[in-house]
Image: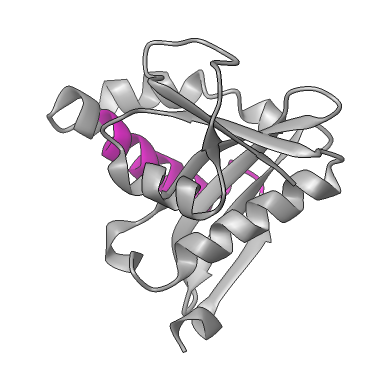
Amino acid sequence: MARMTWIFSPERVDTPDATALRRDYYGDVAGRYFRRVVTEDEYNEEMLNDGLDLLAPPAGQFLVGRHAGEPAACGGIILLDAERAELTRVFIRHAFRGLGGADLLMNGLEDAARSLGARRTVLNTRLDLVEARALYTRHGYGEIPAYCSGPYMDIWYGKEL
């Protein structure tokens, strides 16, 4: 029954709801990494260098999920090349976890990747983000060799669509 109350749709990354969700995402993942609350300056610096132009067609897509009308989840797709799309910023606000939204978000992101022409999805994450890693493996993602590098990447996953 909880799944009936979720609605996912493409949205510009600069809407108030999308911006608030991206801030919560950064607060969660950066706060866990630094083991402290992220400062306002850190939010602003990271969100200004966010690659937002890639999260809109034709290069990608950004989805916002609402549970009973409340903005509760987000995720993005970025085309890396003609066949691969990267999942990014996959996030469910803590108050909405366990209500079936994560599976619907993953399905929506994969559908968005297909609609952009991708035949494979890839992603990177950190080892400490155990909930995210469990979600990805539950959806058929397997560990792959690194396709990119960065300071906050420990493990890479991929899936044929």
Residue 154 shows in this picture:
yes
Image coordinates for residue 113, horizontal then vertical, percent: 75, 44
Work out whether residue 66 or residue 133 is closer to the camera in this orientation and state it: 133
Residue 24 falls inside the magenta stretch: yes
Work out whether residue 17 or residue 150 is closer to the camera in this orientation and state it: 150
Which residue lies at the image location 38% right of the left edge and 11% below the top edge? 151
Q: Is residue 150 depicted above or below 32 in this figure?
A: above
Work out whether residue 155 or residue 17 is closer to the camera in this orientation and state it: 155
Work out whether residue 147 or residue 101 is closer to the camera in this orientation and state it: 147
* Residue farthest to the left, as pictured: 36
Where is residue 80, by image quadrant? top right
The overriding secondary structure of the stretch rendered in magenta is: helix
Image coordinates for residue 91, horizontal then vertical, percent: 43, 49
Image coordinates for residue 41, horizontal then vertical, percent: 29, 21
Residue range in magenta is 12-30
Which residue lies at the image location 31% right of the left edge and 38% below the top edge? 129
Which residue lies at the image location 62% right of the left edge and 52% below the top edge? 63
Q: Is residue 133 depicted above or below 124 in this figure?
A: below
Left or right: 148 in relation to 77: left
Residue 14 falls inside the magenta stretch: yes
Where is residue 46, by image quadrant? top left
Q: Is residue 135 depicted above or below 33 in this figure?
A: below
Q: Looking at the image, how many numbered discs can be counted on the residues? A: 0
